[in-house]
Image (tube, rainbow, N blue to C red):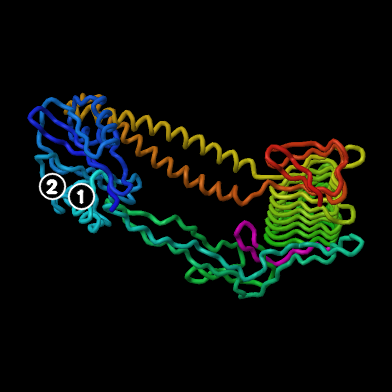
Amino acid sequence: MKRNAFFQLIQKEDGMYLKSYPALDGGEPVTMDDVMLYLEKKKIMDVQVEDIAVFIADAAEQKNAEQKILPEAGLTENEFPIITIDPQKRFAKIRLYPPSNKGRRLSPEEILDRIRQCGITTGIVTENIKLLLKARLYCTDILIAKAVPPVEGSDAEITYHFDVDKTCTPTMDENGNVDFHQLDMIEGVSEGQLLATLRAADIGQPGTDVMGGLLKPRKVKQLTLKHGKNIHLSEDKCEMYSDVAGNVTLVNDTVFVSDQYEVPADVGPSTGDIEYDGSVVVKGNVLTGYKIKAAGDITVNGVVEGAELITEGKIVLKRGIQGKGKAKMQAQGDVISNFIESASVVSGGRIMTDAIMHSDIIAEDDVLVKGKRGLIAGGSVKTKTRIEAKTLGSTMGTMTVLEVGIDPKVVERYHLIEKEMDGLQKEKETLFQNLKLLKKRLETRGKLDEEKMAGMKKSADRINAINVEMEKLKNESDILEEELKKKDSGKIIAENIAYPGVKMTISTVTNSIKSEVQHSAFVRDGADIRVRAI
């Protein structure tokens, strides 16, 4: 049976000695730290470190070594346990030291009493205590208690009973012409139709740490069925139904059902600005200076001039936008347009078009410029994911800025939390050291002055406050880290050619095209942007 080496106090007429006993079957040797810890716990002072060092060295070479450490025999010492508890209170260990030559052994009841005095009440491993005392496994860490782990729960889950991935992808013929007349953009629903069901979260069951405290299961994601008008929920809030026939969209986890407002001609002097809590279809054009604001999708069959379009859904422009530097479009969903020229566009989804010229584009998802021209020239295009076009820039060297990658706001907050937690950890360590020093003085002297006692309380209170603050920051950091893991570095693709004058930024790395590059994808590789053939 494997057994660690151990030591014993021996009281003789001429003083106190340490005696070693060898390890068996590959057990660990006696260490300086183990001896010093035991002497400190037993308050055996004035021992010379040099004497302990000699004893450790002799013990390593001899089966039984003895070393005198004090000129007086001292008090008789009984068998002595040191109990340690994991900081997370998930387990506890005992380390037993032998009695001196005149001391006595402890009974199982005495060991259990010591364990309870340490506040350990749960998961006591009585078999290990019996083994410890029967085999007298000295100077060996033995598990004496383990926590009852929590039963983990499960996240809430929503199932949508309609197509939430309507792509609005236009069809393309063999010549590369985009047919914006055939768009699958409307998801129709009927009155009373089931739209979504919710499976509620299972919060799990708490466990118990070795000191009787709660071990909480991981936090589960709680969800609710969120919706706009024309929708109702079942009594238990777990089913969602449409109140009207119309079209349904999902925007930012919220379901909208709306009927449709149709403008038979142009949006202009005859209509004024339009604001509608649903979808809007314009049969004609949207003239300069006018505005459409909708809760649903906006579809324009004609041309958008220097107008403003704002929607919580998608924007579909079958003939495109010629913005004259005045047009603005903002959609929480996708933006589909035959072309985009001299306009500012913000999309919460993808942008799909035949050409982007001298415009400022921001998208949460891919920017796909893949029609007959497939051109991006002038202005800027920014997205978290991918930019894909046939041609980037122009033969004239038009300045064209392209940016892909992770949301910088998320990265900035993530690193700020790291710095805050590092600062709090350093402060906590300093407070621990001060608290430890004051406690040692209190044990040695028996009392401290009022100022130092107040300092001890203040340090302990601050450590508790830091623990609470660090837990909050850790939870936020975990959420941000999961979000960052979902994002890749982004990609820029030129199916045909990329001209000089194109400036690319992928994540935090920037590079400019110096010479023509054909049939290539641009990706981040460490601190560089690499060109790969497609």
Question: What residue is drawn where x is 55% and y is 41%?
Answer: 414
Rendering quarter of residue 372: bottom right
Rendering quarter of residue 257: bottom right
Segment colored magenta: 250-265
**Cβ atoms at labels 2 and 1 below 8 Å apart:** yes
Is residue 433 at least partly visible in the picture?
Answer: yes
Element marked by disc 1: loop
Query: Hey, what amino acid is under mark 2?
Result: Arg
Query: Hey, what amino acid is under mark 1?
Result: Arg
Q: Give coordinates of residue 213: x percent, y percent.
A: 30, 52
User: Mark 1 packing: few (<14 Cα in 10 Å), some, or many (20+)?
Assistant: some
Does residue 362 appear to the left or right of 426 in the view shown?
Answer: right
User: Mark 2 packing: few (<14 Cα in 10 Å), some, or many (20+)?
Assistant: some
Q: Give coordinates of residue 107: x percent, y percent.
A: 13, 51
Query: Quick check: is 70 in the magenta stretch?
Result: no
Element marked by disc 2: loop
Question: What residue is drawn where x is 31% and y is 35%?
Answer: 460
Q: Which mark is residue 456?
A: none
Query: Quick check: is 255 in the magenta stretch?
Result: yes
The one nearer the camera, 382 or 436, is 436
- In the displayed structure, 243 sits above or below 414; it is below
Does residue 123 appear to the left or right of 399 in the view shown?
Answer: left
Q: Badge 1 is on which residue? A: 136
Question: What residue is drawn where x is 12% and y is 40%?
Answer: 101
The one nearer the camera, 83 or 330, is 83
Q: Give coordinates of residue 124: x percent, y percent.
A: 25, 56
Dominant SS in magenta: strand
Q: Which mark is residue 105?
A: 2
Does residue 260 appear to the left or right of 389 in the view shown?
Answer: left
The one nearer the camera, 21 or 143, is 21
For the residues marked 2 and 1, what is the alpha-carbon distance in whole angstroms? 10 Å
